[in-house]
């Protein structure tokens, strides 16, 4: 059987390791229990989490045992990594509700039968801790000077780092230490922004137990320009269909930059690397075939084959300029009929539908010929949309740019 470390490396997952050679040997010689933590700070996982779930799935397929750790305890504090401001404080009820939604996604990708994977919640051991005992037993092993040098804290020093957040590294390190003892968990995996926290855990295990544990991080999902991938007009690209519809999800991947195709096919699908390289080598208009494959495969993994097929059929009809106003999978906004009694300006309507962030953006789009309503180009920035523009099903379609379609309905 191939060493999963080589597979993860070939597909572009591996960013940093505590010791690459030792990790490769470990993964090649025994079934390793490892964990990735997911703080339930929102009611849905997003595409950045999906990359880590894919890594867990690769690991499990090669005989290793995942621990999907729900951060019910750490979410009470909030991870300062990659955050310019303190996270919004959630109630225990909100955290538990979010955690239940996360569990549904994990069960889609990981096999929990016969103890092949387990799901834990760090609230079970973090919340009952006596704080003074924790400081004496765990805090004594952490140097404040070293912690302040960690990227996750250093980037927050100018805007202010609360003492609450300063505890996060100790809590995450304690997670690793706890599971090392209780579950024989020898590795922690995570996004590259977790490197300092992961090292904290391996060091704690070494200092308290005199034993070796390992950490490995993955590259964050970024575009070829270095920007964080997974941002849409409405915010994050969520895995929950109630927050990001399968059609919107499909369209995101269908519209990515040509230079990002190979990375996304490698990280977010299970296609063989020979096929990935072949698709990524397509040039000109042909690269759109690769984008279709990417969009279909990722949507199928998240939302199932039926939804992926529906999204693909809808997108193909739009790309072939056979736009159907009756299309049910298109993103839509419902407005009150009384807004149309005297007409509503196109810029106001686009803002209402979250198609533009500002009217100045909308004006530029119209001036550049980038806005259409029911296939009729809009040339006037003050253009009024009235009841007469809507069909018998009370619908119109706004097209923004070349690829974004949005249905407006009234009730």
Image: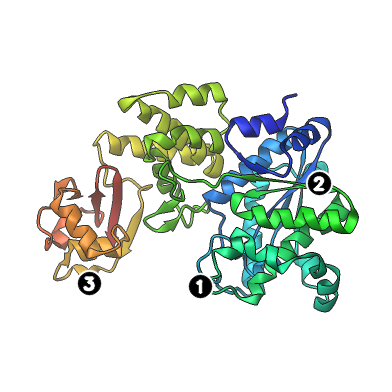
Toward the right, the furthest residue is 209
Report the residue marked by disc 2. 186
Q: In the picture, residue 356 is in which quadrant?
A: bottom left
Task: Point out the residue furthest to the left here.
Answer: 380
The label shown at residue 338 is 3
Viewer-side residue, 107 vs 258: 258
Secondary structure, mark 1, is loop
Q: Earlier in the sequence, mark 3 or mark 1?
A: 1
Dots 2 and 1: beta carbons under 8 Å?
no
What residue do we see at 54% from left, 60% from top? 82
Q: List x then y, in percent, for residue 9.
A: 63, 33
- Mark 3 or mark 2: name the one nearer the start of the chain: 2
Task: Name the quadrant of the C terminus.
Answer: bottom left
The answer for how far apart the CA atoms under marks 3 and 1 are is 45 Å
Task: State whether residue 28 is above or below residue 301.
Answer: above
In whole angstroms, how far apart are the C-alphas of marks 2 and 1?
36 Å
What residue is pinned by disc 1? 159
Crowdedness of circle 1 by 10 Å Cα count: few (<14), some, many (20+)?
few
Residue contact at pointers 3 and 2, CB within 8 angstroms: no
Classify 43 as above or below 376. below
Give the side of residue 223 with respect to residue 67, left or right: left
> On the image, which quarter does residue 17 sit in?
top right
Within-10-Å neighbours for mark 3: few <14, some 14–19, many 20+: few
Which mark lies nearer to you, 2 or 1? 1
Residue at 82% x, 36% y is 31
Q: Specify whether residue 103 is in view.
A: no
Determine whether, in the image, residue 303 is placed left or right of residue 184.
left
**Along the viewing direction, whichever of 193 and 309 lies nearer the viewer:** 193
Evaluate whether residue 222 shows in this view. yes
């Amino acid at each position: 059987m191939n060493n999963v470390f080589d597979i993860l490396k070939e597909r572009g997952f591996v960013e940093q390791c505590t010791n690459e050679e030792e990790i490769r040997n470990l993964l090649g010689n025994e079934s390793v229990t490892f964990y990735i933590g997911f703080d339930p700070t929102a009611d849905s996982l997003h595409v950045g989490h999906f990359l880590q779930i894919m890594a867990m799935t690769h690991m499990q397929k090669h005989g290793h045992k995942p621990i999907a750790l729900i951060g019910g305890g750490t979410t009470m504090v909030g991870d300062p990594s990659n955050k310019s401001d303190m996270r919004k404080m959630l109630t225990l009820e909100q955290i538990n509700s979010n955690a239940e939604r996360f569990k549904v996604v994990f069960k889609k990708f990981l096999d929990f039968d016969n103890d092949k994977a387990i799901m834990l919640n760090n609230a079970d051991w973090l919340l009952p801790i006596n704080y003074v005992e924790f400081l004496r037993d765990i805090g004594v092993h952490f140097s404040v000077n070293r912690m302040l040098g960690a990227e996750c804290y250093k980037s927050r020093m100018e805007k202010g780092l609360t003492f609450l957040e300063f505890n996060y590294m100790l809590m995450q390190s304690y997670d690793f230490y706890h599971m090392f003892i209780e579950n024989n968990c020898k590795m922690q995996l995570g996004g590259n922004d977790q490197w300092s926290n992961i090292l904290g855990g391996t060091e704690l295990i070494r200092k308290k137990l005199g034993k070796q544990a390992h950490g490995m991080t993955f590259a964050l999902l970024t575009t070829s320009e270095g920007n964080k991938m997974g941002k849409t007009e409405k915010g994050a690209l969520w895995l929950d269909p109630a927050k990001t519809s399968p059609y919107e999800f499909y369209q995101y991947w269908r519209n990515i930059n040509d230079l990002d195709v190979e990375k996304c096919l490698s990280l977010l699908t299970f296609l063989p690397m020979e096929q990935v390289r072949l698709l990524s080598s397509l040039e000109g208009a042909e690269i759109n075939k690769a984008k279709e494959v990417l969009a279909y495969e990722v949507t199928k993994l998240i939302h199932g084959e039926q939804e992926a097929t529906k999204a693909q059929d809808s997108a193909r009809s739009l790309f072939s300029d056979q736009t159907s106003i009756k299309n049910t999978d298109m993103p839509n906004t419902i407005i009150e009929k009384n807004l149309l009694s005297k007409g509503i300006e196109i810029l106001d309507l686009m803002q209402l539908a979250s198609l533009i962030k500002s009217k100045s953006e909308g004006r530029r789009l119209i001036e550049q010929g980038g806005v259409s309503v029911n296939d009729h180009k809009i040339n006037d920035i003050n253009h009024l949309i009235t009841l007469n523009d809507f069909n018998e099903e009370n619908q119109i379609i706004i097209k923004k740019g070349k690829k974004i379609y949005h249905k407006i309905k009234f009730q």
